[in-house]
Image (cartoon, coloured by chain):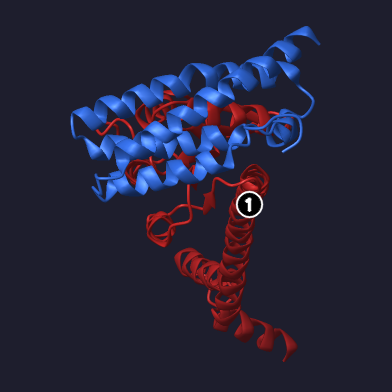
Amino acid sequence: MASKRTLVYLVDDDEMYLKTAVHTLSQNRSFDIKSFTSGEKALAAAKASKRKPHVIVLDYFLNSEDSNAISGLEILKQVKQTKLESEVIMLSGQENIDVAVNSLKYGAYDYVVKNKSAFIRVQNDIKRVFRQMIKDKETKKLRVFVFSLLFVIGLVAGVAVLFAVDSTFMGLLPDPMKPKEKTNKATTENANKQSGINNSNTINFQDTLQK
Amino acid sequence: MGKYEHIDMSYLDELALGSNEFKVEMIESFLKSTPESIMQMKEAISATNWKTVGGVAHKLKTSFSFVGMENMVQLSREIQDAGLEARIEDIPRMVEELEDYYLKSEVELENELEELKNN
């Protein structure tokens, strides 16, 4: 879905309506329109294509003539079950509360009656869906960026805390140089002992000289 | 109704957005598909397949609306409802009425088509 153009699938078994819909919606230059006379063909094309449709405009009564054809509602369910991420706008020839309720219940973005203002409404819906998709995508990108930033900040802060803790504890412990001095003193004393020099003797010798 | 008695091209004009080519295509589609649909309904009546009658009438509604035949839109809606509810007694008469009206409109549509092609 990287393109800035909106890919729209139009699905209707009424060829005259389909032609009119293609003609009307194609006037919008940011729409790429593909038309299908059955839901099965549309679904197969959507699954096979790399570029998935942003919006599927679907006639509710796709099986009005051919009872073997899959209904618009069934296609809607299948679209929602797959990972197409397409929004579905359901079209119906007449106002019917059951059709409207079923369409929205199964995840349709809108339910539009095929009256004279239908194409205007469909066009506005398509624009709104695409804008929302762009917005969602940007929000997702921003979220990933913020999480990455927080992770880096956390990491830097963690390292800084480790250093701080380390320094504090090092301050509380005896100076690492001191044990070394002790060791040197001890070594000197040992060496003196071995060479027969006694500090107390040296003092005594100096006392004698002073006397 | 203006120029014609049975049809009204104003909605199609509106949809065409200035394209005569589109209007020609639509009228040709209408003249081809409507007789086929009427025939399909008659066959379905003979086979007592009322659901198919209703389904075909459902599709005809939109076709009639494009050429401004509002009374046929209404009649198609009645056939659709009767077919889907299996109220069979009125269906054959209504389909006959629809066919008669279509035949009257056919002449006007052919005139319109010729006019569009000559422009």
Identify by letter the chain in red. Answer: A
Residue A13 shows in this picture: no
Chain B colour as displayed: blue
Regarding mark 1 in the picture, which secondary structure is present there?
helix
Amino acid type, mark 1: Gln
Q: Where does residue B11 sit, x and y in percent of width and height?
A: 69, 37
Residue under label 1, please give it. Answer: A132
Instruction: Tell which of A128 and B98 is nearer to you.
Output: B98
Residue at 40% across, 37% down: B57
Q: Is residue A61 left or right of residue B86?
A: right
Instruction: Tell which of A178 and B88 is nearer to you.
Output: B88
Chain label for disc 1: A
Q: In which quadrant will I find the C terminus of chain B? A: top right
Which residue is most to the left? B47
Q: Where does residue A187 sit, x and y in percent of width and height?
A: 50, 66
Residue B76 shows in this picture: yes
Instruction: Tell which of A169 and A196 is nearer to you.
Output: A169
Q: Where does residue B51 sit, x and y in percent of width and height?
A: 26, 40
Residue at 68% across, 83% down: A206
Instruction: Tell which of A83 and A199 is nearer to you.
Output: A83
Classed neighbour count for the residue bearing mark 1: other residues with Cα under 10 Å, few (<14), some (14–19), many (≥20): few
Which residue is most to the bottom? A211
